Amino acid sequence: MINKLHKVLTTPINLKRKDHTINDEALFSESQLISQFPGVLCVKDSHGRWLQASDELLTRVEIEPTSFLGKTDNELMEYPNSNQKLLSLNHQIELKAWETDSQVKESILLKYESGDIIEVELTAIPITKTINSQSRLIVCGKFSNQSNKILDKLYLLDSMFNFSHLSFIILDKDLNIININKAFKTLTDLSFDDVYGKNLSHINIGKNHELSTQILKSFHDEDFDLWEGEIICPNEAKGAILAKLEITRIINEDNITSHYFATLIDITFQKKNEKRIRQIAHYDGLTGLSNRVLFMERLNQSLSECKRHNKSLILFFIDLDKFKEVNDSYGHDIGDKVLKESANRFLSITRKEDIVSRFSGDEFAILFICEKPIGQILFEASIISNKIIKQMSNPFFISNKEIFIGSSIGISIFPDHGDSVENLLKKADIAMYEAKNRGRNNFQFYRDEFSIATNNRLEIEKKLRQAIINEEFKLFYQPQFLLKDNKIWGAEVLIRWFELKQDFKKLVSPEIFIPIAEDSGLIVEIGQWILEKACTQLKLWMDSGLPIKQISVNVSARQFMDSGFVNSVSNAIKKSGIQAQDLELEITESMLVGDIKRIELQLTRLKSMGVKIALDDFGTGYSSLSYLKNFPIDVLKIDQSFIKEMTADSKDAKITCAIIEMGHSLDQKIIAEGVENEEQLLFLTQRGCDIVQGYYYSMPLPVNKMTEFLKLPR
C-alpha cells in the first residue's frame, strides 16, 4: 500500500488536458486505491492543486469526485455547497507545512444540522524528494463524532472566535500571526494568506517599526498581563484606519507563555469625535483661537517651565476699543467679522510658539515667553504692543463698510508682577483698564498704583449703585439766553452726585463717575432718572408761569443706542405733561458714527414725536458735514474750547463764524457755551449767534436757586 501510494505521489500528472485525466493508465489502480482510502487523504502538488483525494474527504467537503482535480482550496471554496471551514483548515495547514518544511497537525470542530459535532484532525506532510523532483503534499486525517458537553463548549468558543464582530488575532510567542478571524479580514482587508507567519508589526503601517519589540519587552514583567496601544492598519476603502490593539498572554500547563491573544478595534471615528469635542472644549468657535480654558492650561504649563528654566513670561491682555458701538450700530454679524479679522491680525504679528486666545467677548490675551534680561523684555513687550495698536488702528473693511476700532493693552510680566496665574491675569487686566482710562488705544505695564486706582473704580461703581437707591443725585440747571432780546430761553440739565458720608455730603466730580457709569451700564438707569426728573421740573416751572421755554438734556451713547430709549423719552414726556417740543436732547458727534440706518431711524422717531435734537461739542469730535446733511439736527452747540480763547482775529473766531453761517444756511439754531465775558458776548451777538450759556450769565444752579433766578426781573 505504501509503495503504491509513493509511486502515485512521485508520478507526474498532465493537468493541461481539459478532462484532467491521468496520462498513465497503469496508475488508475493506484488512483482507485487513494479514492477508497478509509479516511481523509488528499494529495496536492507544490502549487496547492489537488491531484488525488479519498471519497470520504470529497464527501466531507461536499464536492463531486470529477470536479476537484487541478483545483486549489480557494477555488473549491467558491463552489456553492462546499464545506468552506474544512477547506480553509486544509489550506492553512498546507501553508504551514510548506513554510516549515515539516509535518503540521491541526484540528477543528464542525457542527452539522443534525446537531452532531465532529472533530476533524488533519496532518500535512510535505514530500520534496521525489523521482521526478516534483514536490507533493499529503494531507491525511480522521473524523470522529465527539458530541459531548466538552466539545460543545469548544465548538462554541471556536464559533465565537470566527464569527465575532470583534477582530481577533492569535500570535505565537514571538508575536507572529498564526490565526485570524473573519472580522479581522473585514477590518483590514488582509486575508489569512496575507498575514500568516508574519510578525504583528506587518499590520502596523504607522511609523512605529519597533512595535513588537516594545510589546514583548512589556511582557517580560511577569505581572504585566495586558498591553494596549494604537496602531494604523491598512483598509482598502479608507486607505488606513486608526485601531486600538489589546494583547494578553496565553499560559500553557507549564506556566510558560506559549501564545498571545489580540483584539483590534477601529477607533478612527471615535478619535475624530474626540478631536471635535476637544476643539469645541478648547478652541473658540468663532475665531479658531485658544479659548479661556485652554489658555489657562497653557499659561499654567508655561509658568512652570519659566520657573524651572529661569525664563520670563509676558502676558498681554487686550480689549477692543469701541467694539460695543460697532456691535450696537452694525449688528452682531458685522461684529463677529471684526472679531475674526482681529484674531487674524493678532496672529500675523506673533510667533508660532506664542499663544493667542480669545479670552471672552472682545477681550484677547497673548502669552509670550522670553529668555532676555528684564530691560530687553520691557523693550520687546513695547514693540509687540505698538505693533498691535498699529494693526488694530487700521480700518476694517467689512461688508462695504469702513470700521474703526482700537485696542487697549495691559501687560504683566513674570516674575516681576507675580508668580501665579491668578496674579498675572489680574494685574494685566488692571493695567488694561488703566490704558482705557488714559484715552484708550495705548498700552500700560502694570504698576502697583494701578491696583489702588482699580480698587477705587470698583468702589465707586459699588457706591454708584447705592447712590441710585439713596437718591444722592441732584440736578443742576445752567440758564440759556436768547441773544436777540436777552431773555431766558431754556436751561441745560447737569447731574451732580453728593455722596452721603457719616456727617457730611461729598461732591463727586462727573468726570470721575460718568465714565464708570458708562462702562458699567448704570448710565442707562441714571439717564432715565435725569430725563424724568428734568421734564417734571420743567412742567412745575411752566405751571408757575416762570419764563422758560425748554429743557436741554444730555444723552450718553449707551443710552441713545438702548432699544428702549425712544419709549423712555415718550414716557417721560407723557408722565410730566410737557409738550415734546419743550424737550431738547443733546447728542455728541461721536454718537453718529456706526450703523447709519439705525442712528437715522432713532433720530427720525424722536423727531416725529416733536423732540428737538442738538449736536453738542460741534467741531471737536468726528466732524462731518454729512451729519448735518443726513440727520435731522435742529441745533449746533459750539464747543466752549472755541469760545474760551477767542479773539476778534483768532482762528477760533473764524471757526465760530463759519459754524454760525453754515448752521443758519441749514435752518439750524446756534448755541455757544462757555461764554464768560462781555467781549465774547458782543462778538457772538454781532455774528448772529442765537443762544448763549456760560458763567457770564450764571453757573449751573440747583433747583431752588434756579427757581429764584427765573423769578428775577429782566
Image (cartoon, grey):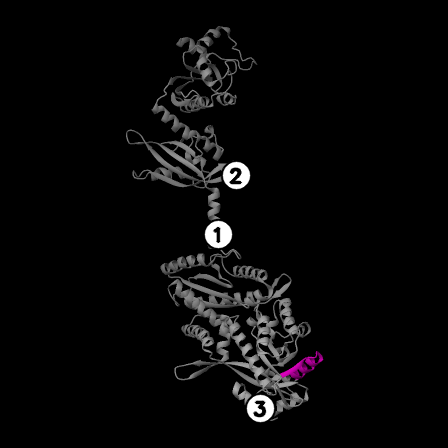
Q: Position of residue 453 (x, y in %)?
A: 43, 74
227 over 582 or under it: above or below = above
Query: Which residue is disc 1 drawn over?
Result: 279
Q: Position of residue 314 (x, y in %)?
A: 44, 64
Q: Counting residues from the N terminus, which is met first, the one under dot 3 or under dot 2?
A: 2
Q: Which quadrant holds the C terminus?
A: bottom right
At mark 1, the secondary structure is helix
Disc 1: CA contacts within 10 A as few (<14), some (14-19) or many (>=20)? some
Please identify, in this view, whether the residue under mark 1 or under mark 2 is nearer the observer: 1
What is the CA distance from the residue labelled 3 to the residue labelled 1? 71 Å
At mark 2, the secondary structure is loop
Please identify, in this view, whether the residue under mark 3 or under mark 1 is nearer the observer: 3
Task: Identify the residue at the far bottom of this view.
Answer: 713
Please identify, in this view, whether the residue under mark 3 or under mark 2 is nearer the observer: 3
Q: Which one is in front, 441 or 214?
A: 441
Query: Which residue is disc 2 drawn over?
Result: 238
Disc 2 marks which amino acid?
Lys
In the rendered image, residue 184 lying in the magenta stretch gets the answer no
Q: Position of residue 235 (x, y in %)?
A: 50, 36
Q: Which quadrant holds the N terminus?
A: top left
What is the CA distance from the residue labelled 3 to the residue labelled 2? 92 Å
Disc 2: CA contacts within 10 A as few (<14), some (14-19) or many (>=20)? few
Task: Identify the residue at the far left of this view.
Answer: 254
**Label for residue 711?**
3
At mark 3, the secondary structure is helix
Disc 3: CA contacts within 10 A as few (<14), some (14-19) or many (>=20)? few
What is the CA distance from the residue labelled 1 to the residue labelled 2? 23 Å
Magenta-highlighted residues? 654-671
Q: Position of residue 440 (x, y in %)?
A: 52, 71
Task: Identify the residue at the far right of this view.
Answer: 665
